[in-house]
Image (spheres, rainbow, N blue to C red):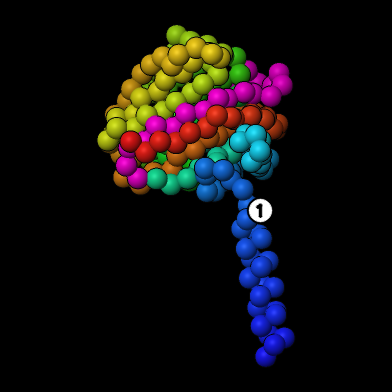
Amino acid sequence: MKQKLILSSLFVLILFTGFKTLKTGLFENNADVGNPKIAGSFSYDAQKKEYTLIGSGYNIWFERDEFQYLFKETKGDFTITGDFELVGKGADPHRKVGWMVRESLDADASHLSAVVHGDGLTVLQWRIAKGKTMRDPEDEIFSKEKYVRTVQIEKKGTLYSMRVASKGQPLQIVGSRTMPNLPEKVMVGMYICSHNPAVKEEVKVSNVTIVQN
């Protein structure tokens, strides 16, 4: 009996230690959406409160997406903010990072994304409903600011707004979009897409906050 108790205690200790070392910061899960050819990954530096995402993927566009996603599920209104810094020169100028609000992990799911590209292009983009094709320019709002550091999405009911700022500058509105097809409970988090299925790209994300409004 004593031996069983010791073994049970060790098992509980192993489980507790395992959960303790799974440090995702403010987020709960990560996934490769759309089955990219090269698997993505993430890490979290608890001391620096900094996230690192590595991922591949052909694009987040047309009728389906491929990317690495670190996210949590949430309900109600919120504001999510963070500083994004792409690592290295990159293989494709259209590699992209930012925030995404998504209905599911399906490759053709409805979503709204605050996007920063490797060439500085900054855009609010969306897929209005599951299975729909994203269109240019109907499904995007372009920012006047390029090479931004801080990116924010604010949700109020079905209205989503994107704000951005260069390093050390105040946030400026990019645009807003109503997303009636996104459910009450959504996935929200950071992502990276290399825009080239044969390579991986990397981004560092810091000063992340999620405020329930």
- Is 112 in front, or is 188? 188
Quadrant location of residue 110?
A: top left
Question: Residue 27: x percent and y percent?
Answer: 52, 44
**Residue at x-position 41% and y-position 28%:** 153
Question: Residue 91: x percent and y percent?
Answer: 70, 22
Look at the numbered disc 1 and give the secondary structure of its residue.
Answer: helix
Name the kind of residue labelled 1 in the image: Thr
Specify whether residue 121 is in view: no
**Residue at x-position 64% and y-position 41%:** 46
> Image check: 139 left or right of 49?
left
- Picture quarter with the C terminus: top left
Question: Residue 121: x percent and y percent?
Answer: 53, 15
Tell me which segment is drawn in magenta.
75-94
> Image check: 31 left or right of 54?
left
Q: Which residue is mark 1?
A: 21
Question: Residue 202: x percent and y percent?
Answer: 67, 30
Residue density around tag 1, few if under 14, some if 14–19, many if 20 or more, within 10 Å: few
- Is 202 in front, or is 194? 202
Residue 101 vertical position relative to residue 6 in the rendered view, above or below = above
| 84 inside magenta stretch | yes
Residue 187 vertical position relative to residue 50 in the rendered view, above or below = below
**Residue at x-position 32% and y-position 25%:** 177
Quadrant location of residue 149?
A: top right
- Picture quarter with the N terminus: bottom right
| 209 inside magenta stretch | no
